[in-house]
Amino acid sequence: MSNESKALAAKSKRLDAKQVGNVLLNNALIIIMLLVAAYVAVTQPSFLSPRSLVNLLSLTAAYLPVALGIGGCIVLTGTDLSAGRAVGITACVSASLLQASDAANKMWPNIGTLPIPVVILISVGLGALIGCFNGFFVAKFKLHPFIVTLATQLILYTTLLLYVQQGNNKGMAISSLDQGYRDFVAGSIIQKLGGPNIPNYVIYALLLTALMWFIWNKTTFGKNMFALGANEEAARVSGVNVLKTTIMVFALAGAMYGWAGFVESARIASNTANTGVNYELDAIAACVIGGVSFVGGIGKISGIVIGVLMLRLIFVALPLVGMDQNLQYLIKGGIILFACALDMRKYLVKK
């Protein structure tokens, strides 16, 4: 072999090693999470029990709609800090409208128990309205989404504190929900058919995921969203309506929060002003783990699903090995920081 051939072969090996190193580094967070999960599975066999796996699947489905919504905001190089409070207010509104007719502390005794489809429309519509509010201020006044949604978060929290004081509630937890509502959300059609006790909201989450995949990948709106996130000026020149697209992205996110609130209300069955608190942290962490880039114009629905699953996997696994629950926010913060650093590294390498 000639010296030139040897040099080319050596260079090829170096490139291959570098490519492998980049792949490992870019996916380091997921690899670490899988290693932690594997360690817990070996040391705590109950981690892989059917009951534990169903619990993991259920938690993933509960948090997934918020991540699906906030993912679009991140694609636009933004975020949404109001997501948790939007979930909280829609959860409390849903609970107050679907309390059992004979509940001792029924918040609105004069309106009875509304039909479930009506409450779904109210909850999703309220969430979408909150999203429109955010999107309008972001697009019309060129305000950073961080500032707009931080302000909205405070407005929603105040509104929620006032709402739970209304009617006969007087600030108490909104509970005693209608059994039909509980069965619709947390019941199990699969169990009735002879399968495992997987809650209905897991099925709804799968349907929402399919819907969001279609919207992101097969509609003009989805294409406009990615174009706008990648380069706003180029998208504008190409004929994308920046105002309309931005508002629609935030409205769609808000609708997802509204659905999440409707589900969360029945899932936890006792709703207070603290319902939904910090849900946006989980959603943002899941999105960046799943490859949705703050650089803009990059993200996949499948990545968001993987991100939510990985995050729930960690928070189901760690308590089994004696991890203090008070450390969960430290871990979330570290995950967000590490994932964003990896994301920026990929951007700088490409640049």
Image (cartoon, helix red, strand yellow):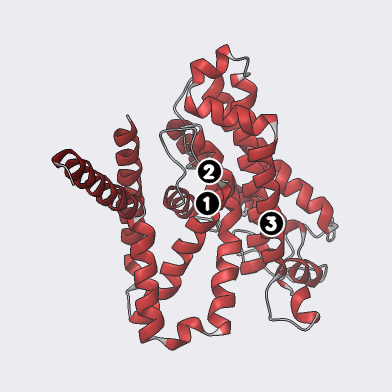
Q: Where residue 102 appears, x then y in whole percent?
A: 81, 71
Q: Could you tell me how far apart the alpha carbons at marks 3 and 1 are, in whole angstroms?
A: 21 Å
First along the sequence among labels 3 and 1: 3
**Would you say the residues marked 2 and 3 are in contact, meaning their CB atoms lie under 8 Å apart?**
no
Residue corresponding to mark 3 = 262
- Can you say whether 98 is above or below 258 in the image? below
Image point 43% across, 48% down: which residue? 288
Q: Answer with the quarter of the image where residue 104 lies.
A: bottom right
Question: From the viewer's perspective, is 330 left or right of 226?
Answer: left
Per the image, the residue denoted by label 2 is 71
Circle 2 Cα neighbour tier, 10 Å, few/some/many (<14 / 14–19 / ≥20)? many
Q: Amino acid at mark 1?
A: Ile
Q: What residue do we see at 61% from left, 65% from top?
A: 173
The span from disc 1 to disc 2 (Cα, nearest Å) is 7 Å
Give the number of the mark in front: 3 or 1: 1
- Label 1 sits on residue: 304
Q: CA distance from mark 2 to mark 3?
A: 20 Å
Work out which quarter of the rendered image holds the C terminus and state it.
top left
- Nearest to N terminus: mark 1 or mark 2: 2
Percent coordinates x, y for residue 25 in the rendering: 30, 52
Question: In this orientation, which residue lies closer to the viewer: 302 or 135?
Answer: 302
The residue sitting at the top extreme is 237
Between circles 2 and 3, the one closer to the viewer is 2
**Element marked by disc 1:** helix
Label 2: which secondary element: helix
Picture quadrant where residue 178 is located = bottom right
Instruction: Decide which of tag 2 and tag 3 comes sooner along the chain.
Output: 2
Q: Are marks 1 and 2 in contact (CB under 8 Å)?
A: yes
Q: Position of residue 337 (x, y in %)?
A: 31, 48
Q: Amino acid at mark 2?
A: Gly
Element type where label 3 sits in the image: helix
